[in-house]
Every structure is written in C-alpha cells, then in structure tokens.
Image (cartoon, helix red, strand yellow):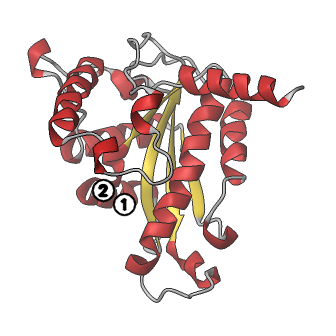
Amino acid sequence: MESTQQYDFLLDLVTKRRTVRQFKSDPVPDEYVMKIIEVARWAPSGFHTQPWEFVVIRDPNVKAKIVAALDEYGPAIKDPAKNDTPRAGFRDAPVFILALCDWRARVGLPYAPRTIEEAAPLYQSSMANAFMLMHLAAASLGLASQWYTSASRPDAERAIRKIVGIPETLTIYDMMVVGYPAATPGSKIVRDLSDMVHHDACGEQDFRTDEQVEEYARVTKAWCMGEH
C-alpha cells in the first residue's frame, strides 16, 4: 500500500472518530476490547516506561456503582436550552475501561523525578497517547466511544477507587465508555488548517486576537452543549 493511501485511511478514521453519548446495550466481543487495549500497548511513553494499567468493567453491579458515583461527583453536562433530564447515555454502554497511571514507573525516567508532581507533565502526555489510540481503535472496529473525563475528578476518583479496588500507587487518568452507537452525532466543527499553521519567523500578528478566540469559543461551546 502506498504511503498516501495509508494516510488517507488514517485521516478517514480520525474524522470518523467521534465522541458518542448514546449507546446500545448490545454486548461488545471480548476480542474487540482486547484489540482496543492492544493498540494502546504500543503507544509512545516517557522513556518507554509504559505507566499504564487498564481495568475492563462489564459486571452490571460494578457498572451501576460507578454510574452512581459519577452521578454524584462527576455528572454529565446538560444543555439548559433543552430543558434536559438525565438521559441513558453512557449508562447503557456494555463496557467501561479505566485507564490508570502507575506513578511508580517514574523510577525508569533518566532524571528520576522524586515526586508525582515532577513526573506529571510527561506522564499526562504518555497517558493521552495511549488513550487516544484506544478511541481510534474503537472507531476502526465500528464501535462508539466516550472520553468520560469526570472519572478523574478527585471525589469521583476516590469513590471509584474504592469500588474497583485500585491501589494507592495508581490514579485514574480517565474512563473510556465503549459500545455500539444508538445515535449519530452532528457534524463536527473544526478550525481551518490555514488558521492554525504558522511558519518560521512568525509574529504576534500571525495568531488569533483575543476577540477571535472568544468568538470561536462561543461557537464551539454552543456546538458542544448541543451534542451533550
């Protein structure tokens, strides 16, 4: 396959990957779940320390406890304009995957950071690498996924930690919700390529003004709220 064809496949996959918030309860094959995590296993990480661990949650009782914790400590965003009532959303998804960061792996870094705070910037990037690949893998298998960031909020994390039995040396990076889509998301808004690429000795005049940033934020916020 020519390299341009590979790029076209990648771009198509990236543009098709969307955050979905309405799932069918149909089961996801174990093979698919392992394929998702297998892709994450090859993600780049700081000094190849691979600080990740993954907890796959299918048990309805465990899922229900996590949902209750998130409803209390990390509720989904609702659009006031829709007069929103809680929707099934991620509750119907058959699989939750917790991505955990094992901070003990920092002993493998060349500068040997003594604290989690010192290693945090590098390991946040490492975990993001793995997590993004997981979402792309899910999309390639015809699955939908949601990046449920509230699972890493301090109160929510403490609750989920007790439910699952996560050791103190690990923290929740985020939770991935996986299943088959029950609804098709709307068209995605993205900035133009020419608006974000700059070359060589560019100056302040080549970047967006405060007013442009604020205006675009209003547009994207309205779009995001509509998707929730």
* Residue under the image location 50 percent in, 52 percent down: 200
Task: Calculate the distance from the C-alpha at mark 1 to the C-alpha at mark 2.
Answer: 5 Å
The residue lying furthest to the right in this view is: 1
Q: Are marks 1 and 2 in contact (CB under 8 Å)?
A: yes
Q: Is residue 126 above or below residue 198?
A: below
Q: In which quadrant of the rendered view does residue 117 lie? A: bottom left
The count of marks equals 2
What residue sits right under mark 1 in the picture?
162
What residue sits right under mark 2 in the picture?
159
The residue lying furthest to the front in this view is: 201
In the image, 156 versus 194, the foreground residue is: 194
Residue 55 seen in render:
no
Residue type pointed to by label 2:
Ala
Instruction: Please state the horizontal and vertical placement of residue 165, each as a whole percent of the image.
Output: 45, 62
Q: Does residue 185 appear to the left or right of 50 in the view shown?
A: left
Q: On the rendered image, what quadrant is the C terminus found in?
A: top left
Residue 217 seen in render:
yes
* Residue under the image location 65 percent in, 65 percent down: 50
Q: In which quadrant of the rendered view does residue 82 lie? A: top left
